[in-house]
Amino acid sequence: RGSISSLMQRLKMARKQVPQQYRLVMLITLIAWMGVAGFVYYNTQLLNTYKTSDELEQHSASFEKKYKKYEKVNLPKITDAKYFIDLFPYKRDVKVRAVLQYTNETNSPIDTLHYNIDKDWNPEFFIPNSDLVYEDKELGYLIFQLRTPLQPGDSLELEIETKSVSQGFENSAGNTGIIHNGTFLNNFEILPALGYNESRELSDKNTRKKYGLKPKDRMPELEENCTEHCMANYLTDGRSDFINVETVISTSADQMAIAPGSLVRKWEENGRNYYHYKVDHPSQNFYAFISAKYEVAIRKWNDVDIEVYYDKKHEVNVERMLDAVERSLTYYTENFGPYYHKQCRIIEFPRYETFAQAFPGTMPYSESIGFVINLEDAEENNIVDAVIAHEMAHQWWAHQVMGAKMQGGTMLSESFAEYSSLMTMKHLTNNPMKMREFLKYDHDRYLRGRSGEVDKEMPLYKVENQMYIHYGKGSVILYALQDYIGEDKVNTAMRNFLEEFKYQKPPYPTSLDFMKYLEPQIPDSLHYLIDDWFKEITLYDNRLNEASYKELENGKY
C-alpha cells in the first residue's frame, strides 16, 4: 500500500532505510550466495551431467523409437573375457582394459557390431579390421562395420578400454560403487552393452502411452516347443552363455581387491597391490569387482575355502556367517549336486545398498543386513542364516542352471533358491514356530505384492520376473509341497532337473521342463496341486466351522 508503485522507487527507498553498517554485510552475503550458486552449477551442469526425470524419460523413449529396429540383428556371443582393472579408491577413479573373444554362433555371417555406451565410462574400442560407421553421442549408440564378415563358428578377439574419472560433485549422490573404502562394480556397469539394450526401454504402460509407444510385455510368452527365446537366458539376454573369466586387478596398498574365481597369485608393484584371479569353471557372464580394507576369516570345508571379507569393526557375526555357508554347502551338495568352485566368499560392502547378491563363488553382502545387525536374541534362524542360505543356493539355481528368457524363468532361480534356504533353516531349528515366522514373511510378501500389482498377476509357472511371486509365493508353495509329498521327492525332482540342464548351452530350460520332473514325484491323489499351485492362482479361505472334544484317561482333552 502507498503511493510508491514502481520497483526502482521501492529499491531506492529501501536503500535509504538500510543502515550503513549493514550494507557491506548484505553485499558480502550476496556475493557469497552467487559464488556458491555458480560453484554448484559448475559441478552439476558442466563437470557432470544433470537430467530431470522428464528428460530421462524422453531419452529412453527416443532410444527405443530410433534403435528398436536393431533388436533382432545378428550378434556374436562373448565366449571368453580377460580384465585388467586398476582401481584408485581415494581418487574414485577406475581404469579398465577388457580383452574379449566373440564367437559367431549363428548360421549367418555377421558384418556389424552394435553397442550401447555409457558416456560416463568413456569407452574406446580396438576392433581389428573394422570401421566406426555410425555414432550417436546423445543416445549412446555405435555401429562398427567389419571389413571381413565373421563367419559362422569363427571367433574374433578385440579390446575395449573404459575409465571412470570422478570430477566435482553431482546433483544426486553420484556413483556410490566407487568410494574410498568399499568399491563395488559389476561387469555390466564397466563395459558397453553389445547390441540393442532392451533394459533402457520405458516399462510403465502409462508412461509408454504418453510417448506414443506400444504396450510392452514383461517377458515373452511361455511356450512348449523352444523358440528364439529359449536360445537366450533371462540374465544375459543371448549375449553370452557360460564363459571363461580371468582378471588382473590392482588397488591401493592398504586395500584388497577381489574378482571372480580362484586367486592365482598376488604381488606388490609401484606401491600398489595386484591380484590375479581365474574362474575354476565356465560361469555366467555376471560378476563383480570389489576393493576395500578387509580382514579375512577362513574355514576349510572339504576342498573348498570358505572366506568372509569384513571390516575389522564388524566382526560380531562373522562366525555365524562361516557356519551358515558350511551348512548350505553340506545340504546343497547332498541334495542337489557338486559345488564347482574352489572357494566360497562372503564379501562385505557399504550400506549405500541393502542387498546381497550371488556371483560365481562370490557373494557380496551389504553391511546393513548381516555385518552390523544385532543378533543377540536370535539363537537360530536369523537373517544371516536366511540371506546366506538364499545366496548360496544361487550357486546351483542360476549359476549352474538358468531359465530361458520367457515366462517362468525366474521360478527356476529365485523360487528354488528361496525354497532351498527354507530347507536349510528347517534342519537348523528345533523350534517349529521359527519356521512359521519365515514362512509368514514370504507369505505376507506375496499378499502385499499382489495387492500392489499394476499390471497382471501371473501363475507361478508363468511368473514375469515379479518378485512377490517368485520369492514369496514360489518358496511357500515348494515348502508346502514337501510337507505333502516329502522333502526327498521335491529335492529329487530338482536334482534330476539340474542334472539334465546344468551348464548346458542353449536351448535353455523352461518351467515346463521342470514340471516334467516334478509331476512323476506327486501321487495321483495330489496332482490337483500342480494346477492349483503352479498353473492357476488359488487363494484359500480356511475357517473352523465345528469343533468337538473328549476327555482322555489322563484327564486331559
Image (cartoon, grey):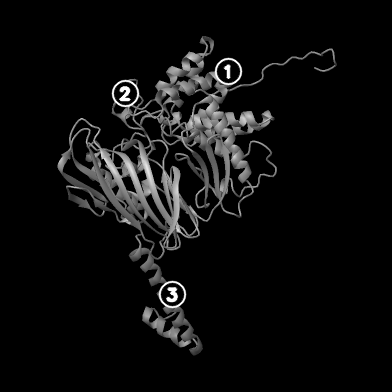
Q: Secondary structure at mark 3?
A: helix
Estimate the x, y position of residue 141 in percent, counting from the top left. Answer: 25, 49
In the picture provided, is 108 more to the left or to the right than 214? Answer: left
328 w.r.t. 211: above or below:
above
Q: Quadrant of the N terminus?
A: bottom left
- The three-letter amino acid code for the residue at tag 1 is Tyr
In the rendered image, which residue does mark 3 sit on? 33
x, y percent for residue 234: 37, 34
Mark number for residue 226?
2
Residue 538 located left or right of residue 102 = right
Residue placed under numbered mark 1 in the picture: 484
Q: How many marks?
A: 3
Q: Residues within 10 Å of mark 1 (few under 14, many from 20)?
A: some
- Dividing the picture into quadrants, the one containing residue 67 is top left
Instruction: Name the amino acid, label 3.
Output: Trp
Mark closer to the chain start, 1 or 2: 2
Q: Residue at x 27, y 43 (%)?
A: 64
Q: Tell me: residue 155, above or below residue 411.
A: below
